[in-house]
């Protein structure tokens, strides 16, 4: 039904765009196009007839389902919206109960003196925290990592989340980034460096220093993966320690261990403390007393697992009466044989409204331990149609996100320097979501030796996520992609440009219902993107950040449904398509850290834009070819504007025409320049000339000059490596 309705709405939107092109006038907000307009072409009539036939077929199938509903006596249940807290904390971790002795013992082991080194042993003794999923291994390690005595004892502390695949290069790179406090651009220079050179850099950085290295969530139990890094830590001071958290006993045997902490389940009282800490938020003392007996019985169901206790407590927070708590205690879910954690999560999941269920399940597309950006996640929900199609989709998405946070489905929430929020999802929660998704999600991990043909269930698979190991190229063929709604490729390494372009072209021809195309980590060496992307009329989000693309095809401008276009750190990108004004649904355009100096004027006609980041525009005149300051005049829905101005001075007429003062929704304005010698007078003049409203958070950034120098240095280094090859 979603696909057919989307086809119908897209056809109407295309008609609206065609009429606007013919009249040389922008489409009015809220304009409705009648299905059979006199200016319809024969092709449009045929297309609408095809949609009508599909709708008729679906209606017949729904009638059959309705008859079965009546036959078996199924009842309709209203979907109620859960009560939400007005505010959500993103920084504080829940108090860790029942682990005081474990914490003290672990800290003592980390701080004790080094014993004599045995043959082949590293000076950095390895300490394991071993336990089942959801028992609190990572939480204990975090508590110890930030302990005052530990911080004072060690010269350097390093945290690396390893997850299921132990990639020696990635782990070594993260260690160096932490040791040398590298920024994003500098860290990218390590991508092409061999493991041997990375290990040598680690050796020099930790020479005779007391180092604590935490390797969180290790699964790989082959010693070969660890040998190089273990060798490097022989150069550290004897008091150095390596702390490993794992749920697999076989991992312990791969490293020379100093001691192993078997983390056991909590007792009933500690489980109750965690559950009540979540469940009793906002309740009076009298209410808490009336619910305590029932709550303690529910806590026993958690079998000592803090993750289950936290999830159940978060759900009970929204249950008001003792009868509702009794329903949870007596639920048949506990008898399904899913295990205590899954059973607790299933109860929390059933308690969600249907729209939030969709949003939660979508999160199963991400690899374990993947850092998710809140705003990007909300935009992905938008692309899948999970949020209302009103003007306030973003507000609705924030509400859904806060609800999932309140239910403890997300963890490790952090506020970044740029103000953005990131989070992660616990491994057990990811497994749970994938279990519920069934065949709707295919999650593939490809390695060099794998068959690079991916086979999908053509009638059931809606989401495909592919994780590529080092030196693994893009899949040669993805079969059964006709019904895909999202495609996520994680960590694409360098491949042959023409070869990858051809494979991608074949995929885009098949996946005609694709709504999201996301390349996490770039598109490798592919210099041009296939023009077949212009046929994906349902596409709403494209993320090509960190890619080596030089040009985007003009065919991309046919995507009238496109809402989000991310081109962050595309250093090679030379220009955007000329007819950008045809992307009439575009709400987010991000070209942060690109090196383009000229943008098409059509951007000024994209009246649906909410965020415009990294844009370069002329401020000294109105140019007929280049995007200029005055071209912002019609972008009245902007919330965030991050621009770089070029030119000798601010033209007063252009600044006035931009009309930033009257943009009622503009909350965040960042103005930068690439010119040297910027003083405080110029900074003051720029902001004053633009004259944003007093409520707008306006700032002038000098770091843009430094950023450009870093980008140029990066280019020079890349070109030097290419010449050497």
Image (spheres, rainbow, N blue to C red):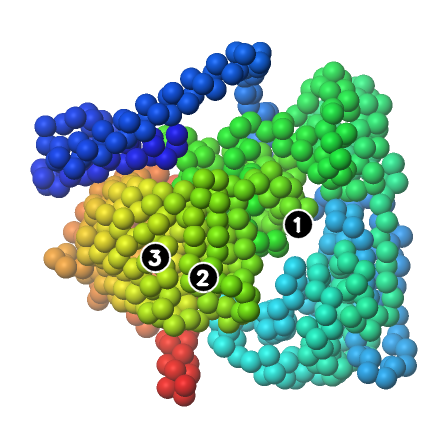
| Residue at image location 36% in from the left, 30% down from the top | 390
Q: Tell me the distance, in whole angstroms, between the alpha carbons under discs 1 and 2.
A: 26 Å
Tag 2 and tag 3, C-beta contact below 8 Å: no
Considering the image in quadrants, where does the N terminus appear?
top left
Task: Name the N-terminal-most of marks 1 and 2.
Answer: 1
Q: Position of residue 474 (x, y in %)?
A: 44, 63
Mark 3 vs mark 1: give the one in front.
3
Tag 2's secondary structure? Answer: loop
Quickly name the residue at label 1: 427
Tag 3's secondary structure? Answer: helix
Mark 1 vs mark 2: give the one in front.
2
Quickly name the residue at label 3: 506
Q: Position of residue 329 (x, y in %)?
A: 77, 24
Q: Tell me the distance, in whole angstroms, between the alpha carbons under discs 3 and 1.
A: 34 Å
**In this rendering, is residue 429 above or below 706?**
above
Quickly name the residue at label 2: 475
Closest to the observer, 601 or 193? 193
């Amino acid at each position: 039904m979603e696909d057919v309705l989307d086809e119908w709405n897209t056809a109407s939107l295309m008609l609206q765009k065609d009429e606007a092109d013919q009249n040389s006038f922008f489409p009015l907000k809220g304009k409705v196009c009648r299905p059979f307009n006199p200016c319809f072409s024969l092709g449009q009539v045929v297309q609408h007839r095809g949609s009508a036939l599909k709708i008729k077929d679906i209606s017949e199938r729904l009638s059959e389902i309705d008859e079965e509903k009546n036959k078996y006596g199924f009842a309709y249940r209203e979907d109620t919206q859960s009560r939400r807290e007005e505010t959500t904390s993103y920084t504080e971790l829940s108090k860790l109960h029942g682990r005081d002795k474990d914490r003290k013992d672990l800290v003592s082991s980390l701080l004790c003196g080094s014993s004599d080194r045995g043959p082949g042993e590293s000076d950095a003794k390895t300490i394991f925290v071993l336990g089942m999923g959801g028992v609190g291994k990572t939480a204990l390690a975090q508590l110890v990592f930030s302990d005052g005595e530990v911080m004072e004892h060690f010269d350097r502390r390093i945290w690396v989340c390893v997850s299921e695949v132990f990639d020696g290069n990635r782990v070594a790179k993260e260690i160096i980034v932490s040791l040398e406090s590298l920024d994003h651009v500098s860290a990218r220079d390590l991508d092409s460096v061999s493991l041997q050179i990375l290990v040598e850099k680690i050796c020099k950085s930790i020479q005779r220093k007391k180092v604590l290295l935490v390797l969180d969530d290790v699964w790989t139990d082959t010693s070969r993966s660890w040998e190089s890094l273990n060798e490097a830590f022989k150069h550290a001071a004897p008091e150095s320690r390596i702390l490993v958290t794992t749920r697999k006993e076989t991992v312990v045997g791969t490293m020379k261990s100093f001691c192993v902490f078997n983390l056991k389940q909590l007792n009933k009282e500690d489980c109750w403390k965690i559950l009540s800490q979540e469940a009793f938020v906002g309740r009076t003392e009298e209410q808490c007393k009336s619910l305590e007996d029932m709550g303690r019985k529910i806590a026993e169901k958690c079998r000592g697992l803090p993750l289950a206790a936290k999830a159940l407590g978060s759900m009970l927070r929204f249950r008001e009466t003792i009868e509702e708590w009794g329903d949870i205690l007596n639920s048949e879910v506990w008898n399904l044989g899913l295990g205590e954690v899954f059973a607790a999560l299933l109860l929390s999941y059933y308690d969600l409204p249907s729209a939030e269920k969709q949003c939660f399940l979508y999160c199963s597309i991400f690899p374990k331990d993947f850092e998710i950006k809140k705003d990007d996640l909300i935009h992905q929900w938008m692309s899948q149609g999970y949020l209302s199609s009103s003007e306030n989709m973003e507000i609705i998405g924030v509400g859904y996100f806060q609800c999932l946070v309140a239910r403890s489905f997300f963890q490790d929430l952090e506020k970044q320097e740029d103000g953005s929020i990131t989070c992660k999802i616990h491994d057990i929660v990811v497994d749970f979501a994938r279990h519920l998704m069934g065949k709707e999600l295919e999650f593939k991990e490809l390695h060099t030796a794998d068959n690079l043909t991916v086979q999908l269930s053509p009638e059931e698979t809606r989401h495909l996520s592919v994780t590529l190991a080092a030196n693994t190229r893009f899949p040669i063929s993805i079969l059964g992609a006709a019904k895909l709604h999202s495609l996520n490729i994680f960590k694409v390494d360098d491949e042959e440009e023409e070869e990858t372009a051809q494979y991608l072209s074949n995929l885009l021809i098949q996946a005609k219902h694709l709504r999201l195309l996301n390349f996490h980590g770039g598109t490798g060496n592919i210099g041009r993107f296939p023009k077949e992307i212009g046929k994906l009329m349902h596409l709403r989000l494209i993320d090509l950040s960190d890619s080596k693309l030089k040009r985007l095809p003009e065919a991309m401008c046919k995507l009238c449904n496109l809402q989000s276009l991310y081109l962050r750190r595309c250093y090679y990108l030379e220009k955007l398509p000329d007819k950008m004004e045809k992307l009439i649904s575009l709400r987010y355009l991000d070209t942060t850290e690109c090196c383009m100096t000229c943008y098409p004027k059509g951007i000024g006609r994209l009246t649906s834009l909410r965020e415009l980041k990294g844009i370069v525009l002329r401020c000294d005149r109105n140019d007929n070819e280049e995007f200029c300051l005055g071209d912002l005049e019609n972008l009245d829905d902007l919330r965030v504007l991050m621009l770089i101005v070029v030119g000798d001075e601010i033209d007063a007429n252009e600044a006035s025409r931009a009309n930033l003062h009257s943009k009622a929704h503009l909350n965040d304005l960042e103005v930068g320049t690439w010119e040297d010698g910027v003083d405080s007078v110029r900074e003051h003049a720029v902001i004053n000339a633009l004259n944003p409203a007093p409520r707008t958070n306006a700032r002038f950034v000098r770091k843009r000059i430094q950023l450009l120098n870093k980008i140029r240095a990066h280019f020079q280094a890349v070109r030097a490596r290419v010449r050497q090859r």
